[in-house]
Image (cartoon, rainbow, N blue to C red):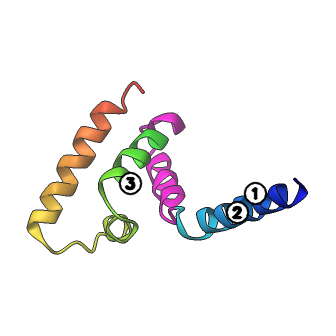
Amino acid sequence: MGKVFLWIAAVLLVVFFVKTQYLTSKTWEPFKQGCIAGGTATEEQCSCLANYVHKHFSDNDVEKIMQGTITDPALKQKVEGIVRVGSRECKNP
């Protein structure tokens, strides 16, 4: 019975390590802080918008959005639409 608990603990430790190292977004917090720095939204609204944007774009895309280096007109239009809809939905989260 003790070996079972050791295996379960080992598996949970591996899952925790993989989740914290590889599955967390590195742009979520900077995006949220940038939103808050804009001064027109609450922390709750900015968290909602960060979740919404990260649901639709990868970390690389979000990094490009924050840096303003999107050159593809279609992607630029998609970003504007997603942020507009997300802002509307997160106005009263």
Q: Residue 54: which numbered mark, if any? A: 3
Q: Residue 32, how many percent across, how many down?
A: 49, 51
> Is the C-beta separation of discs 2 and 1 under 8 Å?
yes
Question: Horizontal placement of 33 versus 82: left or right?
Answer: right
Q: In front of the other: label 3 or label 2? A: 2
Q: In front of the other: label 1 or label 3? A: 1
Amino acid type assigned to the residue bearing label 3 in the image: His
Mostly what secondary structure, the magenta segment? helix
Q: Which residue is mark 2?
A: 11
Relative to residue 40, is residue 22 depicted above or below? below
Q: CA distance from mark 3 to mark 2?
A: 28 Å
> Which comes sooner in the sequence, label 1 or label 3?
1
Q: CA distance from mark 2 to mark 1?
A: 5 Å
Magenta region, residue range? 25-45
Amino acid type assigned to the residue bearing label 1 in the image: Ile
Q: Residue 47, how many percent across, how many down?
A: 49, 42
